[in-house]
Image (spheres, helix red, strand yellow):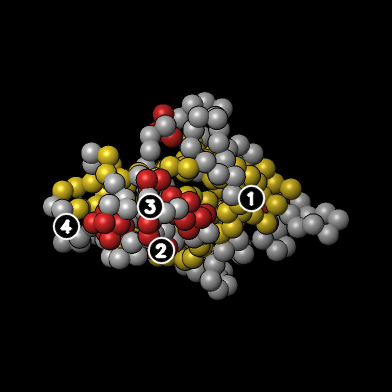
Amino acid sequence: MPSIPWLRASGLAVAVLCLSACKSGSDTTELRFGINPTTYMRPLTAESSSQRTAMESPLPPPSFRSNDGLVFTVEGAYATLFDVRLELPSGHECSDSEGKLAPLMTCTDAADGRPGTLSVREPLFVNWMNAVNLPNGPLRIPEGDYSRIEARLGQSEPELSSFIMDASFTWEGKRHLLAVAFTSTAALRFEPRGPFDIAGSGENTVVVGGLDITTWLEGIPVASCLALGDLTLDNTILRLETGTGACAGAAERVKQNIETSTRMHLASHR
């Protein structure tokens, strides 16, 4: 696989995966990964875009808090995902969407008691903030009911991280950056908190499956640790691997929080 330069940086946070259920007449929808509401809440058509007024304020970038209230704003987030897959909607066969699915998609019909499956046959290099992935191109899938989306983190090359995130914060009146980077092969399971029907939810609906950013620093009192010296800054960069005292093991806790923060839900374009 090619080397992706932005995976060599350290940094970033929160994940989201979107299946836009717009009525394009093709009876397919789009599978997309992203965390920034400005990305997945944007108008679907030029007409809807022209209806927006200059008075509308832009959505703020995603942010989260440490256990003791220090605010972090996501500047960027990236990941490498392998084995992205989901079950075919009930009653749907691969031939129903022949020629309509993304080139990266492989479709397998149900057989021997096993459900039909859609899978992405190559690793995806995901830019969560911009809701784009490499290889480029929309991931078209059939419209229908999906109970979950599964994937796993991985490394395309030994020296690259599986997940990186940078989030800015203010400490003692100065801007700093929290840098998170780790390798992992953890399974990710994106599930809704309740059932929903993509096909019957309206033309401006997006299915967002992602990571609950608000959980990432649970149990980690960053401000207190900085004040006590249990976390230290490298110039303007904070790396949780340096944690001692109340922040001992903070990097591993954040890694586990990110891996278990998967969600899937419906949203509507403004």
Q: Residue at x 50, y 29 (%)?
A: 159
Q: Mark 3 — residue?
A: 244
Q: Where the N terminus falls, by quadrant?
A: top right
Element assignment for label 2: loop
Q: Do residues under tags 1 and 2 come within 8 Å of each other at their CB atoms?
A: no
Which is nearer the eye, 225 or 171?
A: 225
Q: Nearer the viewer, mark 1 or mark 2?
A: 2
Task: Tell which circle, 4 or 2, labels the residue nearer the N-terminal end.
Answer: 4
Residue type highlighted by circle 2: Glu
Q: How many marks?
A: 4
Residue type highlighted by circle 1: Arg
Q: Residue at x 60, y 61 (%)?
A: 148
Q: Mark 4 — residue?
A: 54
Measuring from the top left, give residue 92's x and y in whole percent. Answer: 70, 58
Residue 85 - label:
1
Residue type highlighted by circle 3: Thr
Which is nearer the eye, 227 or 152?
A: 227
Task: Tell which circle, 3 or 2, labels the residue nearer the N-terminal end.
Answer: 2
Q: Quote the CA–CA distance across marks 1 and 2.
A: 29 Å
Which is nearer the eye, 144 or 219?
A: 219
- Crowd around label 2: few <14 · some 14–19 · many ≥20 (10 Å): some
Task: Tell which circle, 1 or 2, labels the residue nearer the N-terminal end.
Answer: 1
Q: Quote the CA–CA distance across marks 3 and 2.
A: 16 Å
Q: Quote the CA–CA distance across marks 4 and 1.
A: 40 Å
Q: Nearer the viewer, mark 4 or mark 3?
A: 3
Q: Where the C terminus falls, by quadrant?
A: bottom left
Q: Mark 2 — residue?
A: 218
